[in-house]
Image (cartoon, helix red, strand yellow):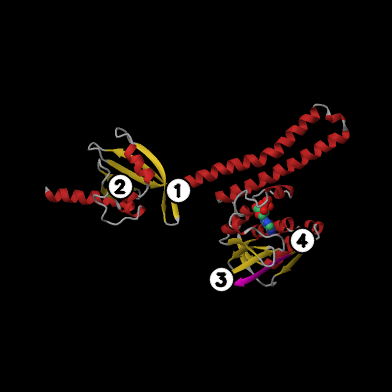
């Protein structure tokens, strides 16, 4: 009988210790009687927790306050931030009341879930914000035309030009959004093969020749002709187009932009370097986020959607590469991508 009981206890202990959620039991005085391994890890406590107050063990006043105040007749849940060292985690606690006045608390780290929820909310808000302006121009101008402006050819032309421009902008935004969602869903098919960056960079320069010319910008390609990378040609082309297009847009007229590449150990770094204003250091790690712009007004004025660099990041990561940006002396920045050599 006793061995059976012991066996059962061992099994229960094993189950408790293998649960990923942190489990704590406190008595009616909020003294800890039991913690599983996940709980001691979460609160970074030692094995000598038995009989200590939850206040001392958890060191989160709002959480302890909640346990103290919680209606002893009901099971409840509560969320709080847990700061340990440099990390802040968002924790959800479910509290089950026990007959003896104690409480069993199950804690789960919901940081990632909450972050994703926030990203989704922000994304929807950003998309709506981006679409609102062009849609309102299309709707206001067509209304003005219908109300009689159609009979004034000069005015009508102006209104229609704005409709056309904004419809074009909507197309740009929607195409970028579709690209992004295809990339995120992993349904963008990439075919990696041996690519010559020199050849692709020259084609990229050619495709943006008119734009560069209009801003008297010089684009140099400085890449060894026989250097190769393992990449999807269309994706690699698109990445360089986005980098170069930005460099032309965000540097003053008469700038010099250089597309260069070199082999560094086990990877090839391809860079688009400009001599423009560069990126403020404190936002350098955010420019690859969706809709992030250093200067939103200027970006829209230049026809930007704020999505170009996030598309770049997804494309490069889908090719097992990495992206980044560094400011360069005396001015300007270098947008780069690392790819495996072919
Ligand atoms: P956008 O459509 O606004 O150009 P991107 O995702 O391509 O969107 O770029 C995000 C932001 O990064 C831009 O709005 C701009 O503020 C900044 N940026 C990109 N490239 C450069 C550059 N070469 N020099 C300075 N700022 C740049």
Give residue 280's position: percent from left, percent from top: 64, 58
Q: From what the image shows, is residue 277 above or below residue 145? A: below
Hey, which residue is sitting farthest top in the picture? Answer: 147
Give residue 64's position: percent from left, percent from top: 34, 44
Tag 1 residue: 111
Specify the label residue 206 is tagged with: 4
Secondary structure under badge 2?
Answer: helix
Labels 2, 1: front one: 2
Closer to the camera in the image, 197 or 253: 253
Assign the magenta stretch its main secondary structure.
strand
Specify the label residue 311 is tagged with: none
Q: Does the magenta segment cover residue 313? A: no
Q: Earlier in the sequence, mark 1 or mark 3?
A: 1
Closer to the camera in the image, 98 or 30: 30
The alpha-carbon separation of the residues under discs 4 and 2 comes to 68 Å
Labels 1, 3: front one: 1
Q: From what the image shows, is residue 251 above or below residue 25? A: below
The alpha-carbon separation of the residues under discs 3 and 2 comes to 51 Å
Q: Earlier in the sequence, mark 3 or mark 2?
A: 2
Secondary structure under badge 3?
Answer: loop
Tag 2 residue: 54
Q: Earlier in the sequence, mark 2 or mark 1?
A: 2
Quadrant housing the C terminus:
bottom right
Residue at point 88%, 36% (across, down): 154
Labels 4, 1: front one: 1
Cβ of mark 1 under 8 Å from ligand 1: the answer is no
Are the two marked residues, 4 and 3, in contact with CB atoms closer than 8 angstroms? no
Write down the region rendered in magenta: 257-264
Q: Earlier in the sequence, mark 4 or mark 2?
A: 2
Tag 3 residue: 266
């Amino acid at each position: 009988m006793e061995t059976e009981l012991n066996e059962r206890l061992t099994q229960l202990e094993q189950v408790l210790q293998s649960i990923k959620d942190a489990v704590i039991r406190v008595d009616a005085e909020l003294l800890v009687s039991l913690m599983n391994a996940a709980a001691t890890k979460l609160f970074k406590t030692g094995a000598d927790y038995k009989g200590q107050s939850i206040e001392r063990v958890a060191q989160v006043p709002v959480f302890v306050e909640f346990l103290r105040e919680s209606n002893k007749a009901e099971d409840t849940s509560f969320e709080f931030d847990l700061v340990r060292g440099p990390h802040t985690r968002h924790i959800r606690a479910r509290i089950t009341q026990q007959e003896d006045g104690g409480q069993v608390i199950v804690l789960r780290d919901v940081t990632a879930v909450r972050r994703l929820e926030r990203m989704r909310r922000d994304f929807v808000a950003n998309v709506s914000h981006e679409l609102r302006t062009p849609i309102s121009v299309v709707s206001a101008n067509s209304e003005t035309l219908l109300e009689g402006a159609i009979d004034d050819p000069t005015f009508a032309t102006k209104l229609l030009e704005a409709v056309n421009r904004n419809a074009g902008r909507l197309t740009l935004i929607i195409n970028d959004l579709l690209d992004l969602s295809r990339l995120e869903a992993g349904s963008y098919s990439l075919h990696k093969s041996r690519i010559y960056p020199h050849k692709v960079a020259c084609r990229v320069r050619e495709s943006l020749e008119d734009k560069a010319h209009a801003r008297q910008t010089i684009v140099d390609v400085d890449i060894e002709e026989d250097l190769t990378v393992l990449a999807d040609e269309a994706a690699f082309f698109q990445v360089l187009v986005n980098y170069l297009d930005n460099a032309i847009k965000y540097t003053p007229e008469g700038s010099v932009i250089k597309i260069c590449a070199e082999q560094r150990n086990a990877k090839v770094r391809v860079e688009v370097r400009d001599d423009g204003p560069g990126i403020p250091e404190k936002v350098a790690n955010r420019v690859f986020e969706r809709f992030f712009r250093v200067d939103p007004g200027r970006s829209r004025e230049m026809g930007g959607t704020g999505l170009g660099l996030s598309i770049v990041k997804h494309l490069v990561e889908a090719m097992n590469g990495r992206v980044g940006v560094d400011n360069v002396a005396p001015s300007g920045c270098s947008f780069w991508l690392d790819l495996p050599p072919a």
